[in-house]
Amino acid sequence: MELTYAPEEEEFRTRLREWLAKTLPDLPARPDPLDWPGRRAYDLGWQRRLYDAGYGALHWDASPTLRLIFLEETERAGAPYVGANFVGLLHAGPTIAAEGTDEQRARWLPPIVRGEAVWCQGFSEPEAGSDLAALRTRAVRDGDAYVVTGQKIWTSHAEIADWCELLVRTDPLAPRHRGISWLAMPMDAPGITVRPLRTLAGPAEFAEVFLDGVRVPVANRVGAEHDGWRVTMVTLSFERGTAFVGEVVACRRTLGELARTARANGRWDDPVLRRRLGRLNAEFTALWRLIQRNVGAARDAGGVPDAGGSVFKLRYSQARQELYDAAAEVLGAAGALDADQRWTADRLASLSYTIAAGTSQIQRNIIAERILGLPKGR
């Protein structure tokens, strides 16, 4: 499907391109990937520039089409990604915008778009990863607060976060999907212990989070009590539906770079490799068309992506891994020995994509049940 753009949307694209061309040359040098306080400051500084230029709230306070244009153009220009605050900008912020009260939106959204607050995601647990509804972190009501006890794992950027989008079980006797609530937890509350987890690629992007009697105000609950699973599906629809748009643009650019390198180093003479790169080009072209379809569906549905995001996430995860396998074939040992280790880091990072944001097995279940209407397994 070909998404059509209205004249005012094309005007937005032109203005954004001009602003990027003027702004990007003046940015400071990017910090060391292992310097998370430095990366936090750099990423929030970029967000503040976006806010001052009128682009700060595009991740939720704009049509899906404008969000698509924004992500496409910033990635093509090589602009900084959302970085340390991807949870706030791409997951928590859109969820609060869609499900929060007026008071909650006024409280939490402005600091995110001004580059003043970082959010992390407290969903997965040691025994509730892909089977997220099996979570056991308890929240017991005590007056105007919940007392939260439990453990989270794979909590993105917890060590530098100000807030956490937290899933808790508020009714342990209810069916698994019905006794869950979605809370906004301040990360400086007493009783929180954060232990960073270093990834294969080097940086500590995740953390274990231990919660020992943490008090979270009831006013910090987004959605009704025990209705957190439905709110979580809104969060995950953003995570799988539009959060990877910029990465598809980056992969298409990477594929072009590989083709040029293969022509230069002689690998292009291998017909098997040429077919492999050609198939990947078709894959990412199809994924871009799928993004356009999902954006069009979200626009028609009031801004929230539908289950088509799982179709995209499933295929994109595999295609990204195949892209960096092809990169290893094109580059050979030179790819592993590049000075800044970019190719090595990207290839290692690609291994996580069939797990992150819902495993490929979970995406297949969603597609089978919610799109194809197949019965659930027993």
Image (tube, helix red, strand yellow):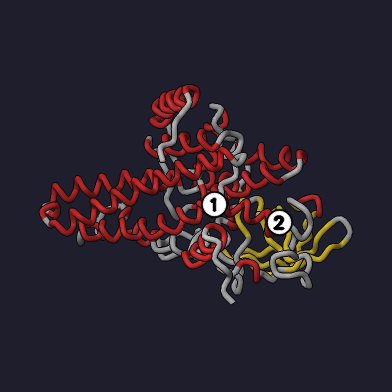
How far across and down, in percent of the image, does residue 172 sit? 77, 71
Report the front residue among 163 and 173.
Answer: 173
The amino acid type of the residue labelled 2 equals: Trp
List the residue tagged with mark 2. 182
Q: How far, Cα to Cα, is label 1 from label 2?
A: 16 Å
Residue 324: x and y, percent?
31, 58
When asked about the image quadrant of residue 273, the answer is bottom left
State the image coordinates of residue 207 (x, y, percent, origin top left): 56, 63
Residue 233 visible in image: yes
Question: Is 11 on the left or on the right of 63, as rendered?
Answer: left
User: Who's the residue at 13% across and 47% down the image?
Assistant: 264
- Element type at mark 2: strand
Q: Kindly tell me whether residue 196 is visible in this rendering.
A: no
Which quadrant would residue 1 be assigned to in this image?
Answer: top left
Residue 239's tag is: 1
Residue at the spot 46% in from the left edge and 43% down from the top edge: 293
Is residue 165 left or right of 102 when viewed as pictured?
Answer: left
Binning the other alpha carbons within 10 Å of mark 2 as few (below 14), some (14 to 19) or many (20 upward) gives many
Kind of residue at badge 1: Glu
